[in-house]
Amino acid sequence: MYEPMSHAFKESAHAALADPDLQQAMAKLKTGFQTKRRVAVDGLPEFDALRDRAREIKDHVFLNLDYYLERFEAKLTEQGGNLHWCQTGEDARQAVLDICRKANARTVTKGKSMVAEEIGLNDFLTANGIEPVETDLGEYIVQLAEEPPSHILAPAVHKTQDQIADLFLEKHTKFGKTQRRDNSRALVDEARQVLRQRFFDADVGITGANFLLAETGSIVVVTNEGNGDLTQSLPRIHIVVTSIEKIVPNREDVSVILRVLGRSATGQEMSAYTTFATGPRRSDEIDGPDEFHVILLDNGRSKMLEGAFRDVLRCIRCGACMNHCPVYAAVGGHTYGWVYPGPIGAVLTPALIGVKEAGHLPNATPFCGRCEEVCPMRIPLPRMMREWRRREFEGKMSPPAVRYGLKLWGWAARRPAFYRLGTGLAMNLLGRLGRRKGRFRSLPLAGGWTGGRDFPAPEGKTFMARWSAGERGR
Amino acid sequence: MSEARDAILASIRRSLGRGSLSAAEAKPLDERLVGGKPHIIPRRVEDTAAWPDLFRAKVESIAGTVDEVADVSEIPAAIERFLGRRNEPNGVVVSPDPVFEGLPWGDASTLDVCFGAPGGKDEVTVTKAFAGIAETGTIMVATGPDHAATASFLPEANIVVLFKSRLVGAMEQAWARFRAEHGAGMPRAVHMVTGPSRTADIAQQLELGAHGPRRLHIIIVGDG
């Protein structure tokens, strides 16, 4: 597990807002992801019905998760695969290392895996003398830059083309690539050439899984580049790093979820490659790995089934919530300080590493509700952020000024007459003070607001007062 | 690791507030597990007569190309047509499928054909589809003695032969057919391929041919 930096959210956010390269890269989010998703969703009249069904399927799975995991294990074993149950990230990393050691592995190729990020697999393998090579282009870029991914789908979305061109020039010189590429086509080609040999040289291939299929013991991997399939087909050993909530009962169930996944993620009706991998190469097959291992991680998820946060386990890691989040678009993924950024991170991160470390995340939201609106699995993200805020407050983890402020407000809000008197006086005062200019450039106790924009002056009376005076219907 | 297994299963049951399921409770789940009951099939595939046009339109919308021939014997010429038009090198690695082995390759003099799995430098492969899915322009291929997984991923161009009788409407229909021919089991890998390989990881600009094929060409073979 890599060192979380979520506690530093505020400081990181200030730095991110002042970073011109990041702001240039993030400005494309709207045209890139939002528009494509809209077009794809509009093209399928059944989209909302499919979302409802997808939610039902996963909720059904969670109520019977023990059953489905046991069936998945039985089917997988029947086909010659090995299942490794791991309670913690440490157990999972060790299980991967043991398999690599036994095979005398020196390099492993990797497809994109958020669970591998969650358990800090790359650093661990490197520390143990095994070289991990990321093969998803975005993951490869951030690995070269020695950075964590900033988006669960587009790990290098925070980087501009110029930054990537400089990075490739610096890191690819040793492969004889000494020319700086000035367009994305040439950059993609160069990465393809450099990585091609690495696919063949690797002793082990590690991928994640989008779904685990109980019906057949298959793992399902969805990609666009084809790197995931070269990673699992060429080396002698294929290791799948995944977690317990990814189970889906059968192939009809997964078809429902696939229809909402691609559209929500990249606006594609289907991603380019959806692979159902089931055990090692059969005796009569031409290619494929000799060994097939599935590392099945819990890491607190079984506990999350309990109640308040069960719904978040439905997440299929499409990234739609972050693509539509105004906070994410402003500060980028690194600001969230751990593996999962954006609204899903604001809910999942406190559950996985504690609200003490990650308490800022559920606070960094305007509650606009866009994330829930676009979530293909209908996860009530704002409601769950509110629940984290409540726990932070009750656990006395927020700063005293915030706690006393909220307490005071809560006391007043429960006394409507008093509340109205107070707001009435305040609006009256602000209305008179601001009448001439219609706005305030600074206000006591509101420096955080007026530091970035003016505060519009109230008109002098509260809504309630005007309503009572009979002013309505306009 | 069986300790971890027991601990995880126990933790799940604790969270759900119950013990392990009885045989009676598991029975409906066992029935569901077999699959075969589609949920929601998009209306766009209702009209079976429109499948070929829908399939072609979908493939072309994602930068794939489609050709159509009446009979298997015309496949080598169709391959030449595709490669010749673009001045491709002529080396072609063909899946060792009995259907392909019996074709009149001698008639296609610009092709240098070999059968088997491709290496890292082979630029063109020819593979056979298990099914084509009209809903999304998707090709389904399965590994076996006659098909290597890498044939779909290593080359610059992948040519896929799809028999018209294997065109279905929705994913679920492809699976129904798969169960009918393969039983309940699965081969090492089943791939659903929807267009050529692509990436938008460089400044969100779409580029084809990230690690897999830059071009995906589908030859539909009629029943003639």
Image (cartoon, helix red, strand yellow):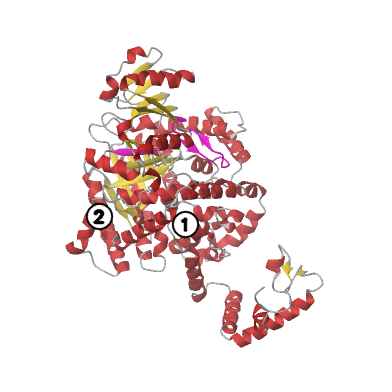
**Which quarter of the rendering shows the N terminus of chain B?**
bottom left
Residue B32 marker: 2
Q: Is residue B187 magenta?
A: no
The residue most toward the right is: A436
Query: Which residue has dot 1 on it?
Result: A375
User: B33 or A152: which is nearer to us?
Assistant: B33
Displayed quadrant of residue A421: bottom right
Determine the secondary structure under disc 1. loop
Q: Tell me the CA gap for discs 2 and 1.
A: 26 Å
Taking the spot 40% from the left edge, 63% from the top edge, the residue there is: A311
Identify the magenta region: B188-215
User: A141 or A50: which is nearer to us?
Assistant: A50
Q: Look at the numbered discs 2 and 1 and tell me whether their residues touch, using CB distance below 8 Å.
A: no
In this image, A262 relative to A203: left or right? right
Chain designation of label 1 = A
User: B63 or A30: which is nearer to us?
Assistant: B63
Q: Residues within 10 Å of mark 1 (few under 14, many from 20)?
A: many
Q: Residues within 10 Å of mark 2 (few under 14, many from 20)?
A: some
Against A172, is A455 above or below?
below
The number of numbered discs placed on residues in the rendered structure image is 2
